[in-house]
Amino acid sequence: MSTSQHRHDDGSQYEPHYPSYDSYGYGYGSQDEATLYEPYALPGLRRSRRHPLAVATTTLVALAVLSVAVDRVVAARIESRTAKAFQEGMDTPLPPQVHVRGFPVLTQAASGTLRHVDITAHDIPAQGATRPLPVSELSLRLQGLTKSDDDSEARADSAEATAFLSYTDVSNTLGLEISQGSRPGQVSAVVLVPLGKQVTVTTTVTAASGNRIAFKDFDVKAGALPAPGSAALDKVFEQPIQLRNIPQGLHLRSVTTTTDGLIAHFSGHSVTFRADDASQDSAGGSDAVVRRVSTLQLGR
């Protein structure tokens, strides 16, 4: 048993009192008093500093979500009205698919110019033509789409397009059974000759001026083609097929063949969709184009 080294003047022993200190250097009378007077407010102060940041972060996230939602509503409205306008103009059975690309759409609409618009229409008729060739599918990629102040027309700074023409429609237009040829860019035509016989002829499809598809370089693959049959074949193919319902300003660049039909590739600048029922194409012919463009709404 240890003996205390601390004594009062009268010789009695005592135990010295050592104050306790917390982590901040503040002293307290005893360990119990230190526990009793522990500064509880300090952790609360730390939480109060984090709280405004959390609120600000939550608010910013909410505003971002709201902004995206509002922008999507505006885009959907523009897409719906554009689809309606194109359906009326092209006389398609169903509205085309329209997609306004780029974010935010709201600021594009406010400026009056949509940067990128994709339109895909199906079953576009070509009525009123000598040899009408319907367009099974037309895909448009428009850049910088605006409309005039009087809503009489819409104009794209530049555009690219592809048109799919089925062999069934091409056959009905030409009056011959058309299918894919043995070489790229070729099609085969079955020609009926006297005595119920058939002769297969191949020809090359090519792009001609004025958005027309021309045929050249005939080659008889099976059988002999008599003189009357040759004359009839020349008559069928001597005139290129005029593609109609193609927006003004788009020019046919090339034609390729697939197993199911022809694909015509277009491009152009200042591509215009007028409110008129008809528009003069680059060759001077009459082409039906998109009507009632005034229903296009760029932000209204």
Image: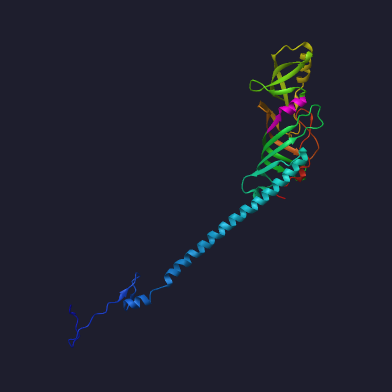
Residue 210 appears in the picture as rendered: no
Q: Residue 142, position in %: x, y? A: 67, 39
Q: Picture quarter containing residue 8?
A: bottom left
Colour option used: rainbow
Q: Picture quarter containing residue 212?
A: top right
Q: Picture quarter containing residue 273?
A: top right
Q: Which quarter of the rendering shows the N terminus?
A: bottom left
Residue sitting at the far bottom: 10
Rendered residue at 65%/48% (across/down): 105
Rendered residue at 56%/57% (across/down): 61
Residue 195 appears in the picture as rendered: yes
Foreground of the two, 46 or 92 = 92
Tally of numbered tags: 0
The magenta stretch spans residue 172: yes
Q: Residue 125, position in %: x, y? A: 77, 34
- From what the image shows, is residue 58 above or below residue 21? above
Rendered residue at 36%/75% (across/down): 35
Foreground of the two, 11 or 188 = 188
- From what the image shows, is residue 71 above or below residue 272? below
Foreground of the two, 298 or 42 = 42
- From what the image shows, is residue 42 above or below residue 132? below
Residue numbers of the magenta segment: 162-173
Rendered residue at 71%/30% (across/down): 165
Foreground of the two, 145 or 138 = 138
The magenta stretch spans residue 295: no
Q: Residue 194, position in %: x, y? A: 79, 13
